[in-house]
Image (cartoon, rainbow, N blue to C red):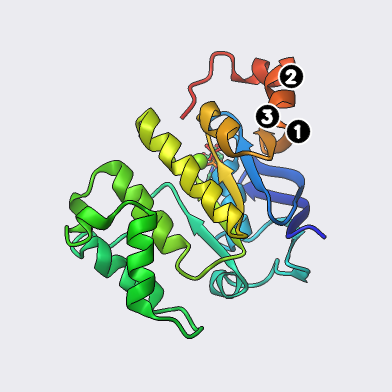
Amino acid sequence: MALLQTHNLNKHFGGLHVTADVSFSLEPGKIHCLIGPNGAGKSTFFRLLLGEHQPSSGTIVFDGQDITRLKSFQRINRGMSVKFQVPGIFGALSAQQNLQIALQHRLDSLDLNAEVERLLDFLQLREVADQQAGNLSHGLKQWLEIGMAISLKPKLLLLDEPTAGMSPEETFMTGEIVKQLNAQGMTVLAVEHDMAFVRQVADRVSVLHFGRIFAEGTIDEIVADERVAAIYLGQSHD
Ligand code: ADP
Ligand code: MG
């Protein structure tokens, strides 16, 4: 059974048809990348999944339940988590304090300090644990945000452009983080522009174009698809 399915999902902003009949299926245990030109509707699709926007029509089923009318916090309680493009960390607090705050919301019995320590090591934040999060490098901030997003052990992690602004080395490291999370059982859906990253992590790739699923397949199938190449011609990639 799919972990997440949308059925004929539509979203209009005034006259703009930003999500157009999206029927999408995400298998559990996979890493799925969503690509597509700037303005294709990728972030809007994420906001629909998380409940930050209500769809104009269509349904969203997550983990066997219709969640279309549920609020964001109810979706998060059911195992969804997201890291958006816009930072959500507390800049004046240390990296360690940010993780402590995120982990406060865990309901299972947990040695909070041990889990903070584990995340600091896993995300290579050990050396900057006491530094103000707002002063961290761009890459470290992104990893801290991933740490906050996984603090509730979500079934599904949504990542909106996790490698934006990163060096190739940081991008690779992010891919390794995502693969390790996936190996621990987390299903991942990532919006991504960097095709090296997509190749590094993705089991499956969907292409969004003008709000529609334009193509879907393995990375090799997508790269070989001339129709997909054509939609990128002359477009900026971010
Ligand atoms: P992507 O993430 O693929 O770059 P977005 O989902 O951010 O694309 O945006 C898709 C289209 O929807 C764009 O034309 C954008 O201007 C429009 N859009 C996104 N959010 C809103 C909103 N809240 N109100 C009106 N238009 C929006
Ligand atoms: Mg976007």
**Picture coordinates of residue 40, whole percent (x, y):** 60, 35
Q: Is residue 157 above or below residue 70?
A: above
Q: Which badge, 2 or 3, comes first in the chain's sequence? A: 3
Q: Image point 45% across, 51% down: which residue?
A: 84
Q: Amino acid at mark 3?
A: Ile
Q: Which mark is residue 231?
A: none
100, above or below 148, in the image: below
Secondary structure beneath dot 3 equals helix
- For label 3, the residue is 219
Q: Residue furthest right?
A: 1
Q: Are marks 1 and 2 in contact (CB under 8 Å)?
A: yes
- Residues 105 and 12: in front is 105
Counting labels gives 3
Q: Mark 2 highlights which residue?
A: 225
Q: Badge 1: few (under 14), some or many (20 or more) residues near its Cα, within 10 Å?
A: some
Q: Name the amino acid type tagged 2.
A: Asp
Residue situated in front as seen by the camera: 70 or 125: 125
Disc 3 from disc 1: Cα separation: 6 Å
Residue 115 screen position, x and y as percent: 39, 71
Q: Is residue 152 left or right of residue 97?
A: right
Tell me the residue that label 1 is attached to: 217
Residue 160: x and y, percent? 50, 46
At x 70%, y 24%, the residue is 220
